[in-house]
Image (spheres, rainbow, N blue to C red):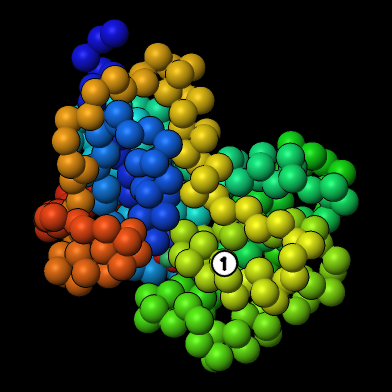
Amino acid sequence: MNTTNSKPIGIFDSGIGGLTVFAQIQKLLPLENLIYLGDTARVPYGTKSQSTIERFALEDAHFLLQHDVKLIIAACNTVSALAMPYLKSHIHVPLLGVIEPAAVKACEETSTGRIGVIGTRATVESRAYEKAFSLLSPSANIFSAACPLFVNLVEENWTDEKETYSIAEKYLRPLKDRNIDTLILGCTHYPLLETVIQKIMGDSVRLIDSACSTALALKKILAEENLTGTQSGGSPQFFVTDEPERFQSAGEKFLGKRIPKVQKAALEMEERTFP
Ligand code: DGL
């Protein structure tokens, strides 16, 4: 076992939503040391252009590399959909996104091959899930829908209001009409709306949460790369680019447990020329 195994795993998201992925990793891999970065100063990413998302994602990854991480998880669907090739060409540690693990799980779960995907506008327009399925299961029928207001509803903690049901009904109706049997929650925030979404879609539709699938994929990669940690070095570290106190209180609600300390991160801005 070399010292690389004891290095932390870096997890980043545009904000608080990646805590869904963080929580599953902590549960499945308690011996790993975790560093979380939420880019709260620049959330949301899901409404931004590809080049902006790439630039933000690289700055987030560089911050984690400064903390000597052994592997980076882009816990944000929008980053995973639009910035993985760019990130891969710029960083030297293994990188894991959330799209492929969720697509693999959906292929395992579906019986009819009719699969729905919901996500931010940027994720849906990128067609990243369709591309993943074209390799994994070319015969699958994929139906996607952007649900941009879901992120705000979760941020407001409106996870069980009547307004949330009517917005969800409007977004999800077209997918329900397609008779899907599996639905990927393709955004970090959506697992928090699971009850609403399940009620609208009905019990016959299986919901796939990318957080659980990503934690399982991480476990496999760590074993393959001989990077599995063997000893937890203590509490995870949390960094945000703005409003640490707000993240701390919202994060505690999100995780259902105390976050002792959230530090402010200063990201180094990339020099990038645009045509
Ligand atoms: N983290 C983003 C995602 O999973 C949702 C929030 C945002 O738009 O930045 O797509």
Figure disc tally: 1
Residue furthest to the top in view is 1
Residue 43 seen by the camera: yes
Residue at figure coordinates x 85%, y 68% from the top left: 178
Res 14 → quadrant:
bottom left
For disc 1, the neighbor class at 10 Å (few under 14, some 14 to 19, many from 20) is: some
Left or right, residue 262 beside residue 205:
left
Residue 38 position within the rendered picture, expressed as x and y whole percent measured from the top left: 28, 57
- Residue kind at label 1, given as amino acid type: Glu
Give the x, y percent position of residue 245: 14, 69
| Residue under the point 39% across and 78% down | 157
Please identify the quadrant where the C terminus is shown: bottom left
Q: Residue at x 27, y 39 (%)?
A: 34
- Residue 88 visible from this viewpoint: no
Of the 4 image quadrants, the one containing the N terminus is: top left
Q: Nearer the viewer, residue 101 or 157?
A: 157
Q: Nearer the viewer, residue 39 or 165?
A: 165
**Which x, y percent locates residue 183?**
69, 59
Q: In the displayed structure, would residue 222 be above or below residue 165?
A: above
Q: Which residue is mark 1?
A: 194
Task: State the SS at label 1.
Answer: helix
Question: Residue drawn at (47%, 39%), measured in percent from left and top?
Answer: 215
Q: Quadrant of ligand 1?
A: bottom left
* Coordinates of residue 137 in the picture (x, y in percent): 79, 39
Rendered view: 71 above or below 125:
above
Task: Answer with left or right where residue 2 lies relative to residue 13.
Answer: left
Of residues 132 and 36, the one nearer the viewer is 36
Q: Quadrant of residue 65?
A: top left
Along the horizontal axis of the image, is 131 left or right of 12?
Answer: right
